Image (cartoon, rainbow, N blue to C red):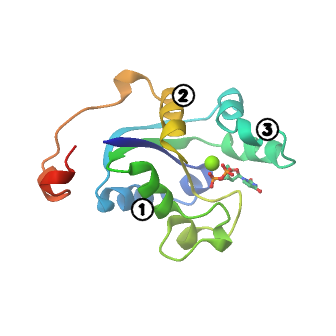
């Protein structure tokens, strides 16, 4: 099963949306294997957003992302990275389709509610960046039998 990192960003925490966002991933059938609250440090953010460090908006992005704590989650499922990105929608909230998280809750290209890993490779790196091994939990869920068909369960 694949893993993806989700960050419920400061705008969503400020707007009391964490519960609703978490519920959407649960309802989809993704398994939460790690979750915590953390005030993201600028040093970690520079790593996390290294692909954007030369952009004119980077300073504002860092300020926003380190303004109040975020909620970080690791979810697991078949093709979890792609499934989560589809649920989240494109970066610009105004372009995101209704039904996606950004489409339903954001009209911004910065305050866009969640971060989601964009490939299996970056998911692995991001999970390692934000979670210690002992913060990730392997456990069997009661509803597992009802989430996937027999031939999908590996
Ligand atoms: N961002 C921004 N201004 C922009 C583009 C992106 O502030 O013009 C922020 C936004 O919060 C976005 C994050 O930078 O989610 C990371 O950008 P990326 O291109 O990786 O988009 P994502 O993968 O989050 O859709
Ligand atoms: Mg990205």
Q: Position of residue 33 (x, y in %)?
A: 32, 39
> What residue did someone put label 3 on?
53
- Disc 1 is placed on an element classified as helix
Work out whether mark 1 precedes mark 2 in sequence or the reverse, and give the earlier one.
1
Q: In the image, which disc is placed on residue 20?
A: 1
Residue 23 spot, x, y in % from top left? 36, 59
Query: What residue is shown at x 17% (from left), y 45% (from top)?
Result: 141
Quickly name the residue at label 2.
Answer: 129
Q: Which residue is drawn at 40% across and 55% down?
A: 22
Residue 52's place in the image compared with 96, above or below, is above
Mark 1 and mark 3: span between their CA atoms?
31 Å
Identify the mark nearer the N-term, 2 or 3.
3
Mark 1–mark 2 distance (CA, rounded to whole Å): 25 Å
Q: In the rendering, which numbered label is found on residue 147? A: none
Query: Please, is residue 50 above or below residue 152 in the view?
Result: above
Look at the image and tell me whether residue 18 can be seen: no
Q: Does the residue labelled 2 lie within 8 Å of ligand 2?
A: no
The C terminus, quarter of image = top left
């Amino acid at each position: 099963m694949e893993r993806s990192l989700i960050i419920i960003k400061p705008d969503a925490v400020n707007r009391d949306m964490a519960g609703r966002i978490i519920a959407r991933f649960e309802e989809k059938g993704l398994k939460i294997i790690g979750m915590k609250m953390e005030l993201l440090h600028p040093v970690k953010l520079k790593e996390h957003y290294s692909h954007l460090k030369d952009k004119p908006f980077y300073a504002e992005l860092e300020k926003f992302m380190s303004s109040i704590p975020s909620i970080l989650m690791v979810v697991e499922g078949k093709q979890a990275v792609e499934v989560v990105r589809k649920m989240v929608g494109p970066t610009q909230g105004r372009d995101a389709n209704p039904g996606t998280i950004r489409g339903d809750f954001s009209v911004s290209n910065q305050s866009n509610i969640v971060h989601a890993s964009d490939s299996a490779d970056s998911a692995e790196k991001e999970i390692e960046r934000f979670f210690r091994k002992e913060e990730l939990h392997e456990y069997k869920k009661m509803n597992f039998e009802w989430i996937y068909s027999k031939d999908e369960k590996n």
